[in-house]
Amino acid sequence: MSEPTAPTPEPMPSPEQFQARITELMSSHFGGSAEFAEEIVEKPDPLIFDKLPRDIKAHLDRYVIRQDEAKKVLSIAVCDHYNHVRHLRTLRAEDAERASRLEYVKQNVLLIGPTGVGKTYLVKHIAELIGVPFVKADATKFSETGYVGGDVEDLVRDLVHKADGDVELASYGIIYIDEIDKIAAPSQLNGRDVSGRGVQTTLLKLMEDTDVSRRSQNDIQGQLQAAMEFQRTGRVGDSEIINTRNILFVVSGAFEKLPAAVEPRLREAKTAKPAVWSPSELLKHATTKDFITFGYEPEFIGRLPVRVVCEALAANDLFDILKHSEGSIARQYRRAFAAYGIEIDFTEDALREIARLAAEEYTGARGLLTVCERVLRDFKYEMPGRGFERLTVDGALVKSPESALAKLLG
Ligand SMILES: Nc1ncnc2c1ncn2[C@@H]1O[C@H](COP(=O)(O)OP(=O)(O)OP(=O)(O)O)[C@@H](O)[C@H]1O
Ligand SMILES: [Mg+2]
């Protein structure tokens, strides 16, 4: 067989030729028009927002155990925000000029609390309930000059993606940034650490009011699409720019070192409070000044006016999650076994034991999955395809899965 000869490279096409070729390619692939059909799903319309804070909390209560204060605070912040959005939209339709002058200070939220206690979970359920796009990212991914594979503005572009290209809907979305405590820049540690501050500066611009281009400079495909859209419509529309003024930001972090900084101040204040405070109690007393000492720029922390602490979850909370949360992993296990025709049920005893073991993991509700996985792994492997129709998980099984499985398999 002869070696395939290397094709002679074609000369680089001009941008116009390139665009024409792409359009050609698209229409030959997707028929007459290069449009992508999108699945139409019935979604709540955030633009006719009519919920009360207590409606939102009631919805959250179905999934999230405890965290009442966080639920309340988030419910209020979200209602204010989307009431404002609704008002703004009505006004805009009547008098665009007045709408653009409408003053509004966003109530961006800072959620504080240990790992696995429901911070992300709360925000995800809120976004779902309201029907706005929701994007989540880790602050650790950012650097001053952007973050691995893109930049901070990509968060906004992701919102457009989540909104199926609806730029207006995206501009009312929720951006959630986790691990925000990792971009604090403690001044005492070393004088050179400016990256945290740099990221804060970039983020605060985004949190405030920035125009973000829908297509990233690094996104060749996006640039091409923009060129095609330009060709089709003959203009660069508003749909190419997303303003962040009405995007709600929720940031969160564990702030493990913050309680130690708050305690001396509380002690000095000599309140009638007990001499020993739990970390979450100390966090509740953290002031803006504490956050600045922790390593935040005043401008940054100042743009997070709503702050709330999520509580650590004890074994009985974990039990409640298993028993009552609509999103609990007990349900997930039921589905997983049902797929093999096996009906699984958990006794009260088993749930207590799982919760107790999970609490020892110190990873919040995530510990529940760790424990269930460890306990039920071999059952999930051995039982399918052997004619079993039922598995009752009781306390003894959770305590010693091996012997329970041996007994079952005979
Ligand atoms: N209070 C809770 N009630 C019910 N389920 C919970 C609760 N907290 C956590 N979970 C469950 O644990 C999972 C992990 O929680 P989540 O992602 O909200 O943690 P987090 O607080 O954001 O932690 P991290 O700081 O590590 O990001 C959730 O998907 C949910 O299934
Ligand atoms: Mg999280």
Image (cartoon, helix red, strand yellow):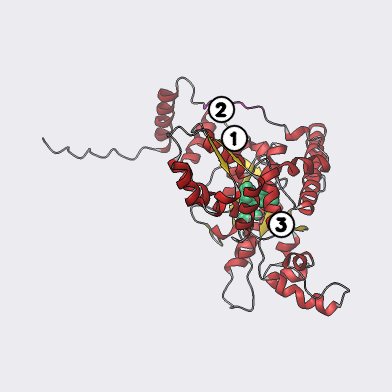
Q: Which mark, by number, is residue 199?
A: none
Q: Residues within 10 Å of mark 3 (few under 14, many from 20)?
A: many
Q: Are marks 1 and 2 in contact (CB under 8 Å)?
A: yes
What residue is shown with label 2? 38
How far separated are the C-alphas under marks 2 and 3?
Answer: 35 Å
**Sequence-wise first label, 3 or 1:** 3
Q: Which mark, by number, is residue 165?
A: 1
**Whether residue 95 can be seen here:** yes
Q: Which residue type carries mark 2? A: Glu
Q: Which residue type carries mark 3? A: Leu
Q: Is label 3 within 8 A of ligand 1 (CB to nearest ligand atom)? A: yes
- Give yes or no for residue 40 being in the magenta stretch: yes
Q: Which residue type carries mark 1? A: Gly
- Give the image location of residue 309, x and y in percent: 74, 59
- Compared with 1, 367 (above or below) is below
Q: Which mark, by number, is residue 111?
A: 3
The part of the chain drawn in magenta is: 36-42
- Give yes or no for residue 144 being in the magenta stretch: no
Q: Is residue 90 left or right of residue 186?
A: right
- Give the image location of residue 260, x and y in percent: 71, 74
